[in-house]
Amino acid sequence: MNIHTLDKYAKSLIKEAAERIRFSFSSELIIDSKSEANDLVTNIDKETEQFFIQHIKENFPDHRIFGEEGFGDDIQDLNGYVWLLDPIDGTMNFIHQKKNFAISLGIYKDGVGLLGYIYNVMEDDLLSAALDEGAFFNDVRVPKLVPSKIEQSVIGVNASWVVPNKYLEHDGMIKLMQTVRGTRSYGSAAIEISYVVMGKLDAYMSMRLSPWDIAGGMVIAKEVGAVVTNLSNESINLLEQNTFIIAKPILHKELLDNYICLK
Ligand code: 2AM
Ligand code: CA
C-alpha cells in the first residue's frame, strides 16, 4: 500500500464528508443522547461515519474501522490497517454553534500511526501529517514547536476539570490557573490538539478522551515535537479511554510534575 495514494484518498473522503455535513444544515437535525445527558449524537454523526465506512470497505476491504458511532469493526487490537475515526468531534458545538467541530481521523498500521487528519469543517482548514514527513496546515508546512515558559503559556482546559471533580486534585489545578497567562476551552478535543500543534495553545488536557478523538492528532503531534501522554505520563492506549495531555516539550514535564495530580 502506497502511503501517498492512501493519503490522497483519505483527504478526498474527508472533503466529501464535510461537504455533506455542511449541506445537512438545510434539514432538521435529529438529536439523541448517549451514555450521559450531555453526551450527544445526531443523525449526521451516524450518517457521516456510515459514509466513510462504505467507501473505505469498497476501496480497502481488508482495512478495519474503529469509529465512535460503532458502525465499523469490533476492534480489540490494532493489527493491520485500522482507521480510527470520529465523524464529528465536538458534537455539542455542531448542534449549538454550527461551528468549531472537526472530522478526526488517524490511519494506523500494526499500531503505528501513518496518517493523521483534523479537518475543521466550517473553516475548511485541514491539518494533516504523514509519518516522518512533517505536518501541514492546508498544505503549508507547520514548524516544529519551540518551548515556552509556563507564565507565558495558554492552556486548553475545560472548566469541569478545574472545579472539584473525582479525577484530579483541584488545588494543583487552581495553582495552574493562577500561574498561566490564560486558559481556553473550545469544546472539540481534535481542534484543541490542532491548536497545540500550530502553537496557538501551549498545552491541552482532558480527563476522558476516546481513541478516535486523539488518534489523528497523535500522528500530527509527533511531527512537530509535541509530547502526548496520559496524565500518569504513560503512553496512550488506543484501544480504550484515556486521560490525556498534549504539550510543548519541557512544559509537558512541568505541568505533570508541579500542577496536575490525579486522585
Ligand atoms: P465528541 O464531541 O466527539 O463527543 C468535549 O470537551 C470534547 O471531549 C469533545 O472532543 C468530545 O468529543 C470529547 N469527549 C470524549 N468523550 C466524551 C464524553 N464521554 N462526554 C463528553 N465529551 C467527550
Ligand atoms: Ca464524535
Image (tube, rainbow, N blue to C red):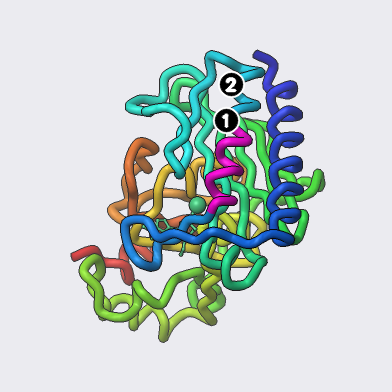
| Residue 51: x %, y % from top left | 62, 36
Residue that carries the numbered disc 2 in the rendered image: 57
Q: Quadrant of the N terminus?
A: top right
- Circle 1 Cα neighbour tier, 10 Å, few/some/many (<14 / 14–19 / ≥20): many
Q: Is mark 1 within 8 Å of ligand 2?
A: no
Q: Secondary structure at mark 1?
A: helix
- Rendered image quadrant of residue 22: bottom right
Residue found at x 65% / y 26%:
55
Separation of marks 2 and 1 at Cα, in angstroms: 6 Å
Residue found at x 31% / y 80%:
163
Which sits in the foreground, 85 or 7?
85
Q: Amino acid at mark 2?
A: Lys
Residue that carries the numbered disc 1 in the rendered image: 53
Q: Are marks 2 and 1 in contact (CB under 8 Å)?
A: yes
- Rendered image quadrant of residue 10: top right
Q: What secondary structure do most residues of the magenta stretch adopt?
A: helix
| Residue 135 visible in this rendered orientation of the protein | no
Residue found at x 43% / y 27%:
73
Q: Is mark 2 within 8 Å of ligand 2?
A: no
Q: Is residue 50 left or right of residue 19?
A: left
- Residue 249's place in the image compared with 218, above or below, is below
Tell me which segment is drawn in magenta: 43-53
| Residue 98: x %, y % from top left | 66, 67
- Circle 2 Cα neighbour tier, 10 Å, few/some/many (<14 / 14–19 / ≥20): some
